[in-house]
Image (tube, rainbow, N blue to C red):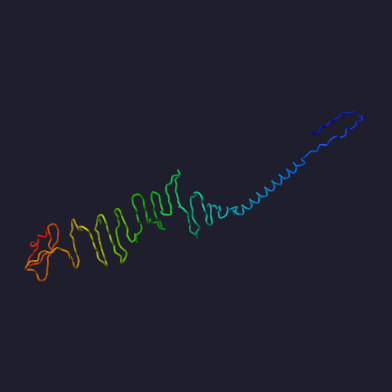
Amino acid sequence: MVREQYTTTTEGTHIQRPENQCVYKIGIYGWRKRCLYLFVLLLLIILLVNFALTIWILKVMWFSPTGMGHLRVTKDGLRLEGESEFLFPLYAKEIHSRVDSSLLLQSTQNVTVNARNSEGEVTGRLKVGPKMVEVQSQQFQINSKDGKPLFTVDEKEVVVGTDKLRVTGPEGALFEHSVETPLVRADPFQDLRLESPTRSLSMDAPKGVHIKAHAGKIEALSQMDIIFQSSDGMLVLDAETVCLPKLVQGTQGAASNSQRLYEICVCPDGKLYLSVAGAGTTCHENSHICL
């Protein structure tokens, strides 16, 4: 610390100034000065390294005024070029591809698309997994490019809106309940088979059931009885030949017809049997078959 002294004198008085016995130097010297310079140099090096890393990151990540890398910020939203990988859920209002390319969603586990309401509850879900495609919604509908419903499913019914439903599986189609359709038809040169292995098969229509085979035959096979019943009409067999090969034949008498002509007889319960034709009816002679 330097101390200064002031002395008051009159005119003509001579005062001898004392000699400076010690000199005080102001500043930083020695090892402190070297440490300070070393610290400033270290800060300068760190500043240059940070600046170089910032330039390198900007160059590698392709930062620009319009976006980063393949990600571009436009007035309509974000535009992403090429393939991208999302590690966490992606929330978006609309996702679409370019005009000249398709949109591909790929995952090693599954792809899940959720629709939520204003309260955050899931109202619809589409989940594509490795073994199953699951849709959770009140109604599932597939439309054509014109907006016509092709396939609609809800809790009450399944509606097929196309003009034709074609089943190509070798085992056909299996229905656990009733099916309502105006026409059931097989492919050309293929057989149509309606079968109920353990239960009954019923075909009902308010205005009639029509069964046609334009180039083949119709077979009805049953382990038990086949019943044709008409409430207000008749049972008509309109054909060139009606063949009943396994009808029971009555006992042939001594005066048998050499031309082997027979008449068809009907029992009270509806059972049919054959009886040798004669000058008159012979059904009563073989009526014991009805017993």
Residue at position x 31%, y 63% in the image: 186
* 215, above or below 60, in the image: below
Q: Residue furthest front?
A: 31
Kindly identify the residue that appears in the image at 37 percent across and 55 percent down: 151
> Is residue 39 left or right of 155 when viewed as pictured?
right
In this picture, residue 287 sits left or right of residue 71:
left
The answer to whether residue 209 is visible is: yes
Residue nearest the observer in this picture, 269 or 24: 24
User: Residue 215: which quarter of the image?
Assistant: bottom left
Residue found at the very far right of the displayed protein: 12
Furthest-bottom residue in this view: 258
Q: How many marks?
A: 0
Residue 163 coordinates in the image, percent (x, y): 34, 60
- Image side of residue 160 versus residue 201, left or right: right
Judge from the rendering whether residue 7 lies leftward or rightward of residue 207; answer left or right: right
Q: Would residue 205 be seen by someone viewing this image from the given angle?
A: no
Measuring 17% from the left and 64% from the top, which residue is drawn there?
A: 246
Residue at (36, 58) in percent of width and height: 162
Residue 256 in which image quadrant: bottom left
Where does the C terminus fall, quadrant-wise?
bottom left
- Residue 219 placed where, x, y %? 24, 63
Give 127 or 121, whichever is nearer the viewer: 127
Work out whether 23 lies above or below 255: above
The quarter in which the N terminus is drawn is top right
Q: Could you say where residue 48 lies in the image, as x and y percent from the top left?
A: 68, 49
Q: Quadrant of residue 212?
A: bottom left
x and y percent of residue 120 in the render? 45, 44
